[in-house]
Image (cartoon, grey):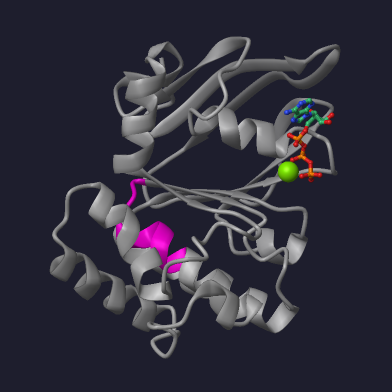
Amino acid sequence: MTPAGSLLAARDLRKAYGRTPALDGVDFSVHPGEVVAVMGPSGSGKSTLLHCLAGIVRPDSGTVHYDGHVLTAESDARRSALRRSDFGFVFQFGQLVPELTCLENVALPLRLNGVKRKAAETTAREWLARLEVDDVHGKRPGEVSGGQGQRVAVARALAGRPRVLFADEPTGALDSLNGERVMTLLTDAARDTRAAVVLVTHEPRVAAYADREVVVRDGTARELAGTA
Ligand SMILES: Nc1ncnc2c1ncn2[C@@H]1O[C@H](COP(=O)(O)OP(=O)(O)OP(=O)(O)O)[C@@H](O)[C@H]1O
Ligand SMILES: [Mg+2]
């Protein structure tokens, strides 16, 4: 069973690396169009939770439900296919393909989902404009600033219209001004497209963009009171 109206929900997730428990009974849910921040100190299990929710890591026990699927019961191939078609990802850095131009980077997930080159590039241009980086089309990731690269990464994650956007410290490598702008653009776009957002961050300033905050500590999660 999943909480009513939720798109993605986890129940009693447990995951240990050797003797280190990373998740020790975590419940989590997010609705379409909702931005949930996952907070907590370093090593508390935030990234592990994100990886389990996205079907990248299989928990030792517990379940993840996504849109009628029991993600934790699906095959690796099926989870990969769902990730490609339904999920978008933004990480702290290093996720752009260095050999491709920024435009090609944004178009890539669309191309992998079978969209023709021209249509993919048109969509990619629209998203680069929306993220206020329409001047970097022909440049490679190594030729743009950190803030520009991160906007390109956000454009790439959203261009495929994901139903869930997973962001792990998306502004961790940016100065505060760039970070705020990227968060505004990311959350506005996600709300517009009704994407659910799982936003991992240890910065309260970033979490402030969320509708709700969940704090992970010692492998368990609790709702932060008064943010709903
Ligand atoms: N692949 C792995 N192999 C072994 N231990 C791991 C692995 N990934 C995470 N851990 C351990 O699991 C625990 C939770 O790690 P996790 O990366 O989820 O924390 P986090 O909250 O994301 O931390 P940070 O804020 O530093 O990114 C830590 O004790 C970590 O050392
Ligand atoms: Mg982490």
Q: Quadrant of residue 158?
A: bottom left
The location of residue 87, given as percent across then percent down, is: 39, 43
Q: Residue at x 84, y 43 (%)?
A: 42
Left or right of 12 in this view: 109: left
**Residue 192 location, quadrant:** bottom left
Q: Is residue 181 visible?
A: no
Q: Is residue 94 above or below residue 155?
A: above
Task: Kindly give the residue lying farthest to the front in the view shown.
Answer: 99
Query: Residue 200 placed where, x, y %?
Result: 65, 48
Q: Is residue 143 above or below residue 223?
A: below
Q: Is residue 93 above or below residue 128?
A: above
Ligand 2 in which quarter: top right
- Residue 141 seen in render: yes
Compared to 202, does 220 lie above or below? Answer: above
**Image coords of residue 108 (percent x, y):** 33, 58
Q: Nearer the viewer, residue 176 or 154?
A: 154
**93 vs 13, nearest the viewer:** 93
Residue 16: within the magenta?
no
**Residue at the outermost bottom position:** 135
Q: Residue at x 45, y 50 (%)?
A: 34
Left or right: 176 in relation to 31 = right
Relative to residue 5, is residue 3 drawn left or right? right
Pick the front one: 148 or 214: 148
Magenta stretch, residue numbers: 154-163
Across and down, in percent, residue 88 comes to 42, 49
Query: Quarter of the image holding residue 210?
Result: bottom right
Q: How many numbered markers are drawn?
A: 0
- What secondary structure is the magenta-colored segment mainly? helix
Residue at 15% x, 70% y is: 118
**In the rendered structure, does residue 159 fall within the stretch colored magenta?**
yes
Looking at the rendered image, the quarter that the N terminus falls into is top left
Q: Residue at x 41, y 74 (%)?
A: 101
